Amino acid sequence: MRENIQRYWQTWINKRIPKNDEIELSQRSIFIIPSKVGLVFSLLLILLLVTAINYQNSLIFGLSFWLFSVAMSAMIFSFRNLSGLIIKASHPTYGFVDDHVEIPIRLQSNKREYQGLQLFWPQHGIKNNKEYEANTIRDVAIIKGQEKEITIPYQLKKRGYLETPRLSLKSYYPFGLYKCWTWLSLKTPGIVFPKPIFTPFIAGEGEGDDMPSDVSLLVGNDEFLGFRNYQVGDSLKHVAWKYLAKGKGLLSKEYDSQQLSMQWLDWYSLQSMPIETRLSHLCGWVLQAEKENRAYGLRLPNITIPPSHGDQHRTHCLTQLALYNINSNDSEKTNGFY
């Protein structure tokens, strides 16, 4: 029964307030219900009216009608405090699964001033008021003609294109008698990368490429700089064998920063693992290779990214991992991501 009600509610709200990257609030998308203070106020108003009827006291009648007019006026002002407000999705958000990020939202006012706005992403796992308070943006005010960008806390849950739940926007303005609220489904651009798992590199077993998994990529001169401790994945031709023979430990020759050790990050080297675990390992390798200033290439089924390094290359590799086996007809989601 409960599932049927929830399904009906979701169908109804999706038709009434469809998903969009820009939404202007109107009578169709705004809901008003009495708040807890409003319910108490209504109860007191009823008691006051009953008292006036019993005692036929004109003064109490006048007070009751005046308070009723205040309540009706508050409802109108509460509605106007949301009506006409424009909410837009902002620039793309990147992050890893389970990361806590700040998702940017733009609020625009063309008609009037708005006060006391509260915004919140409903999330699973929030069990107490402290967590709710920490994730709610309160007392947002916008003057007429202003466009303001705010960021709302959100925990990323699933890799792929960023999919957020409906945004809760509410206000208790002006007297706290009514809760004026709406649920907005925004097309928030962004990509969620797999949660990284950091492990030592494993030699690639890729198909259709005879290049070894660990070679050197020369992008400059070959000036020798010195020695450093051997790291897993270093090319064997850079190992200082003479020092090892003398019992001085395993060292690698280090050249100038323009000569990079190259590492293939290969899907097929993790064959015994589930898909999501493979992607997490590859994600950790991408971050590790970038941190160690290695040139690295990525092999996935039907996808091969040539070796390179740098922020753009890292984002490209992480995006391919995030979108692995995810189909989307919305090509605009990837515009400007890398």
Image (cartoon, rainbow, N blue to C red):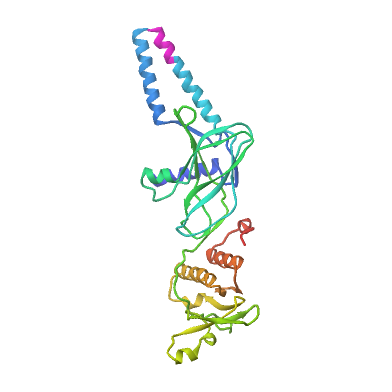
Q: Residue at x 39, y 27 (%)?
A: 39
Give, as a single range, the part of the protein colored magenta.
Answer: 57-64
Is 332 above or below relative to 169?
A: below
Q: Residue at x 65, y 80 (%)?
A: 221
Residue extending farthest to the right is 220
Q: Is residue 187 left or right of residue 123?
A: right
Q: Is residue 92 visible?
A: yes
Q: Position of residue 180 (x, y in %)?
A: 49, 33
Asked if residue 178 lies in the magenta stretch, the reply is no
In depth, the one of 187 and 257 nearer the eye is 257
Quadrant of the snapshot with the C terminus = bottom right
Magenta region's main secondary structure?
Answer: helix
Of residues 236 and 130, which is closer to you in this image? 236
Quadrant, the N terminus: top left
Q: Position of residue 292 (x, y in %)?
A: 52, 73
Q: Going by the image, does 243 lie left or right of 256?
A: left
Residue 210 locus on image (x, y percent): 58, 84
Asked if residue 58 lies in the magenta stretch, the reply is: yes
- For the point 50% across and 87% down, the residue is 240
Please indicate, yes or no, whether residue 1 appears anywhere in the rendered image: no
All told, the count of numbered labels is 0
- In the image, 337 versus 329, the foreground residue is 337
Q: Position of residue 82 (x, y in %)?
A: 55, 34
Question: Which residue is at a point 34% across and 8% down the rendered structure image?
Answer: 55
